[in-house]
Image (cartoon, helix red, strand yellow):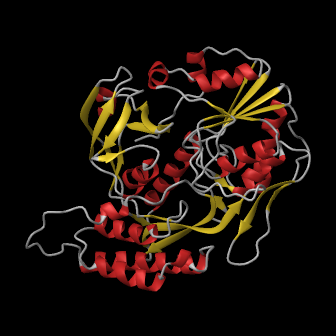
């Protein structure tokens, strides 16, 4: 991707279960064609090579990488479909037990959208968004607690595994959800996903195929853009990822990120309090993280030390020319990961502000995404995120698998979600001397759906 990324939290993934699920195929020969087997074998080879070349721990946590590669490569011959082949590649990488080392398979022939979104709140999972007029909207309710998805329990211990499996590795045409309403009533429903034709191939000789892919990326960037609201004597900066979307910029330059942060800080300096909302933020570019940290401190800040195969420079943020020196409040939740966790922890360690919300994801490594492709004019795209540095905070501790514990633990209930209220933002505003209505706070940054 051209720059370092603190990638989203996905790994682990219940692979021991996935590869041992009994399937009724008695007397049935494998149906994965020779060409498809060759494709999956190439992906397995790429996974082996990328980790061998880039992984931060040369000892690979004591794994015999060659023997593991041989073991999992042999399983491809018995795979009955591409999905099983992809799960085998993912299982191969899962042995590292690393939140930032994982497989992103090729796009499926149909894009599937469940019509619902769910998030971790404390140790439980809740429905947080419903696409209007979807099958999910007719059967689910915001604020429902998700007890299970297709037989897998969903809590803090396995939330990211389940999300990786169903959202990235193996999207399903339908989902069986076990639910509990805010009133305590339990029920089971089957939700059908909406489909949109797509292709795992991108034809570089045919313009519409390529530009469809580009437009899809642009739509995603737009829905994930950062947003700023001024309320009373506070600025609320909703940062959904550590990237910025520019409607009027065609060629990315680092100067654009600097100008964007400078613009937001210029707004914040008009007010006494800056509320930086990192809830649901999975991470992003390290350069963007350093810019934002540099806008909050008047001196050099060592965000963390980086431990890799060879000596690596620490991650240092330099102060920007224009900074915000007022009261700082950072909001986090169970989906805040990577760069979001680093920023929140730096604020705590430097006694710069107050962190409010839920314990964060605990997925904090530095990784690069390595894009791969099969084919010539017509290409199949896939890739791997590979950790190339472990990150150690100034207190000598890693946030991986531990996360950030907020200074003030506060999270919405199922009833809060159902009512559309946001008690966490209300509390942050209160600390900044601003009174917000809970429901109005919940409407401040409305969720935007990608076009189907």
> In front: 37, or 7?
7
In-image side of 123 versus 265 (left or right): left
The correct choice, above or below, for 163 with respect to 189 in the image is below
The correct choice, above or below, for 321 with respect to 273 in the image is below
Q: Is residue 242 visible?
A: no
State the residue lying farthest toward the front.
Answer: 396
In-image side of 214 versus 326 (left or right): left
> In front: 21, or 238?
21
- Where on the picture, by quarter, is residue 194? top left
Question: Percent x, y for residue 218?
Answer: 55, 48
Question: Percent x, y for residue 365?
Answer: 63, 60
> In front: 415, or 251?
415
**Looking at the rendering, in which quadrant would you find the N terminus?**
bottom right
In-image side of 206 versus 340 (left or right): left
Q: Residue at x 53, y 27 (%)?
A: 412
- Where on the picture, by quarter, is residue 75? bottom left
The correct choice, above or below, for 110 with respect to 18 in the image is above
**Looking at the rendering, in which quadrant would you find the C terminus?**
top left
> In front: 357, or 252?
357
In-image side of 76 versus 432 (left or right): left
Q: Residue at x 42, y 85 (%)?
A: 67
Question: Percent x, y for residue 294?
Answer: 83, 48
Q: Is residue 274 visible?
A: yes
Question: Percent x, y for residue 176?
Answer: 26, 41
């Amino acid at each position: 991707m051209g720059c370092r990324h603190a990638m989203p939290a996905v790994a682990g993934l219940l692979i021991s279960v996935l590869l041992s699920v009994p399937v009724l195929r008695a007397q049935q020969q494998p149906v994965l064609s020779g060409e498809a087997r060759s494709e999956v074998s190439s992906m397995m080879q790429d996974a082996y090579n990328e980790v061998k070349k880039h992984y931060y721990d040369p000892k690979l946590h004591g794994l015999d990488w060659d023997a593991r590669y041989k073991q999992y490569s042999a399983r491809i011959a018995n795979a009955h479909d591409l999905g099983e082949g992809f799960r085998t590649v993912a299982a191969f990488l899962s042995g590292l037990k690393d939140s930032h080392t994982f497989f992103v398979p090729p796009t499926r022939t149909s894009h599937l959208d469940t019509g619902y979104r769910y998030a971790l709140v404390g140790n439980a999972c809740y429905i947080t968004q419903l696409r209007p007029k979807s099958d999910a909207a007719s059967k689910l309710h915001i604020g429902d607690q998700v007890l299970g998805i297709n037989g897998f329990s969903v809590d803090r211990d396995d939330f990211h595994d389940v999300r990786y499996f169903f959202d990235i590795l193996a999207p399903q045409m339908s989902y069986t959800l076990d639910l509990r309403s805010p009133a305590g009533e339990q029920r089971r429903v089957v939700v059908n996903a909406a489909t949109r034709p797509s292709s795992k191939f991108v034809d570089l000789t045919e313009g519409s195929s390529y530009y469809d892919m580009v437009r899809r990326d642009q739509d995603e960037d737009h829905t994930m853009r950062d947003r700023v609201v001024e309320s009373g004597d506070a600025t609320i900066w909703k940062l959904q990822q550590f990237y910025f979307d520019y409607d009027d910029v065609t060629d990315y330059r680092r100067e654009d990120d600097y100008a964007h942060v400078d613009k937001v800080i210029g707004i914040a300096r008009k007010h006494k309090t800056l509320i930086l909302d990192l809830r649901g933020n999975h991470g992003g570019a390290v350069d963007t993280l350093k810019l934002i940290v540099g806008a909050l401190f008047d001196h050099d800040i060592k965000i963390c030390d980086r431990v890799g195969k060879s000596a690596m420079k620490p991650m240092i943020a330099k102060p920007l020319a224009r900074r915000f020196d007022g009261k700082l409040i950072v909001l986090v939740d169970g989906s805040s990961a990577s760069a979001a966790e680093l920023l929140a922890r730096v604020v705590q360690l430097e006694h710069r502000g107050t962190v409010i919300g839920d314990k964060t994801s605990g997925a904090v490594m530095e990784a690069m995404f390595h894009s791969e492709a099969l084919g010539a004019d017509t290409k199949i795209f896939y890739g791997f995120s590979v950790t190339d540095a472990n990150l150690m905070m100034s207190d000598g501790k890693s946030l991986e698998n531990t996360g950030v514990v907020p200074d003030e633990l506060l999270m919405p209930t199922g009833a809060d979600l159902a009512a559309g209220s946001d008690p966490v933002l209300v509390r942050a505003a209160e600390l900044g001397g601003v009174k917000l209505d809970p429901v109005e706070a919940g409407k401040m940054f409305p969720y935007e759906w990608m076009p189907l």
